[in-house]
Amino acid sequence: HYFVLLILTDGVITDMDRTRAAIVEASRLPMSIIIVGVGGADFSAMEFLDSDDRLLLSPTGEAAARDIVQFVPFRYFHVSNKSEPSTCCSRVKIQ
């Protein structure tokens, strides 16, 4: 079995350290996390969690086993009239 956690959010992360630790721990499980940012909030923290060019580190320095987070700002799809969910889902790395 493989699981995909879909998170829809309109805000920012309130506890980045706990979030990073949970993602690093989850990176050893058969799962991926897709975060969809809705609205005009500052989603720079979500971009940080979507660590495409390096592995995410926990607050203690432990590296994730693999990149399991994909962040997508909904306004990208809404403004460009792209309704193609496969664009986002194609980035999920099932391993």
Image (cartoon, rainbow, N blue to C red):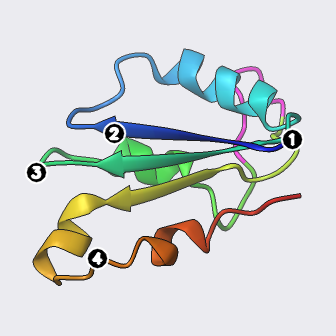
Q: Nearer the viewer, mark 1 or mark 3?
A: 1
Count of residue discs: 4
**Bounds of the magenta span?**
56-62
4 relative to 81, above or below: above
**Residue corresponding to mark 4:** 83
Residue 25 bears which disc, if any? none
The kind of residue tagged 1 is His
In terms of sequence position, does the residue under pointer 4 or pointer 3 come before the other?
Answer: 3
The kind of residue tagged 2 is Leu
Name the element at disc 3. loop
**At 88% from the left edge and 35% from the top edge, which residue is drawn?**
28
The kind of residue tagged 4 is Ser
**At 22% from the left edge and 33% from the top edge, which residue is drawn?**
11
**Residue corresponding to mark 3:** 40
**Residue corresponding to mark 1:** 1
Q: Please tell me how crowded label 1 is: few (under 14), some (14-19), or many (20+) other residues with Cα within 10 Å.
A: few
Q: Please tell me how crowded label 4 is: few (under 14), some (14-19), or many (20+) other residues with Cα within 10 Å.
A: few
Name the element at disc 4. loop
Q: Please tell me how crowded label 2 is: few (under 14), some (14-19), or many (20+) other residues with Cα within 10 Å.
A: some
| Left or right relative to 91: residue 14 | left
Query: Does the magenta-highlighted stretch encompass residue 65?
Result: no
**Residue corresponding to mark 2:** 8
| Left or right relative to 5: residue 29 | right
Which quadrant of the figure contains the C terminus?
Answer: bottom right
Residue 30 placement (x, y as % from top left): 84, 40
Q: Nearer the viewer, mark 2 or mark 3?
A: 2
Marks 1 and 3 sit apart, C-alpha to C-alpha, by 35 Å
**At 76% from the left edge and 30% from the top edge, which residue is drawn?**
26
- Along the line of sight, which residue is nearer the eye, 88 or 24? 88
Q: Nearer the viewer, mark 4 or mark 3?
A: 4
Q: Main secondary structure of the magenta part?
A: loop
